[in-house]
Image: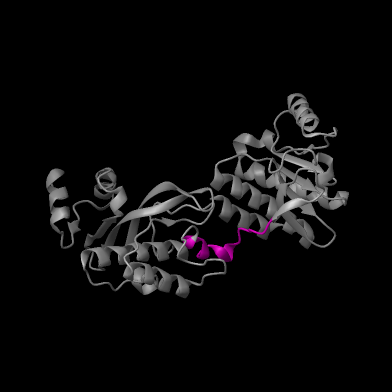
Amino acid sequence: MDIRATKTAFLNELADVTPLQKQGVSLVIDCLIENEVKNNDTPIVITGYNDFDRKSVCRLSQEFCQLMYPKAQSRFESEILSLGGDSVENACINLIKHMRSRGTSLLYWADNPSWFKHLPSGLFHVVCLERKTAHRGYNKLSSSTINVTQKEYKADQLVTELFDGAKHINAQYEVSAQKAHELFYDEAQSGLIRPVPAPAGKKYDDEITIRSALWQKLACVALRRYQGKECNQGFGWDESDEGWAGITVFPIVENLGIDALGEIRQCLVGQVSMEDDGSGDIFLATVWIHPFYRRKGYLTDLWPKLKARYGDFKVSQPNSNMQAFLKTIGE
């Protein structure tokens, strides 16, 4: 499971925890998700004056990390972070000494951000546990407060995150499946063709089917709509169960940077769809790759897998490009 799915399952299974503790663990996991999509290892500090709440969040966060990163369990043993000194230089020296003597943990605890307030801003994620609520952000130089981050990686935001980095769309608020369908339609009508990013911490299935998550099917339908627009073809596919009956999509993906967010996401740049018409015949229905990612051997690499899976399948109405490809591989 990816980290978003693991987060949902882990939080749902928590028992005998308070709402504050559960919120704190959720925010710690959000820090880990942010690390993944930004490709860094920013450490996390859990702060709070209530020892019971703080220790519970530390323990549960460590359990999640051990589940998610079994080969790096030792890096998530929570350490105290209390750095003396009255200047940035002294605080950094003390941090280096601390790391030399105790190792480079990615999980720390403190009563309050004032315990490390002389460190440069943005060096640590900080999850603050207050009396009734929790929030997360980054440490702030010379301050007992933090730069608060409002972003939470929730399960009901997956469809919305398909539009992250799309400057022509205001995805500040939650985007419903119907709204996403309309936005993708508007993109195609305006001639805008873009790779579709997976939500933060998520990946496309190796084979996308009727059982796959809605956000994946929305992305596939969007690419098929791009294809219809480029090739002047009719289009009658949607993300409903009826539309996906007998369909298997093999996604073509690349890890791409989203400049507006400073994140790296797996993005759908093309797809091959196979269709079972119900009579026992299986055929290749569509192939489409974003213009920027063509002639990179994606279809050539995928072809042996398709042959091994489906045998001698038919190709539905191959155009001149597909006919040329089939000729090059001896089909």
Q: How is the model colour-coded?
A: one colour
Q: Is residue 57 visible?
A: yes
- Residue 215, x across and y down, in percent: 46, 63
- Residue 331, x across and y down, in percent: 13, 48
Q: Residue at x 49, y 50 (%)?
A: 259
- Residue 97, x across and y down, in percent: 77, 25
In the rendered structure, the answer to whether residue 150 lies left or right of residue 273 reads right
- Residue 288, x across and y down, in percent: 27, 57
| Viewer-proximal residue among 103 and 63 | 103
Residue 78: quadrant of the picture: top right
Q: Residue at x 33, y 54 (%)?
A: 270
* On screen, residue 323 above or below 177: above
In the rendered structure, the answer to whether residue 320 lies left or right of residue 214 reads left
In the rendered structure, the answer to whether residue 266 lies left or right of residue 289 reads right
Is 234 contained in the magenta span? no
| Viewer-proximal residue among 21 and 122 | 122
* On screen, residue 8 above or below 330: below
Residue 141: quadrant of the picture: top right
| Viewer-proximal residue among 149 and 160 | 149
Q: Residue at x 54, y 52 (%)?
A: 261
Count numbered badges in the picture: 0
Is 156 contained in the magenta span? yes
* On screen, residue 97 above or below 182: above
In the rendered structure, the answer to whether residue 212 lies left or right of residue 103 reads left
Q: Is residue 17 visible?
A: no
Residue extent of the magenta highlight? 149-163
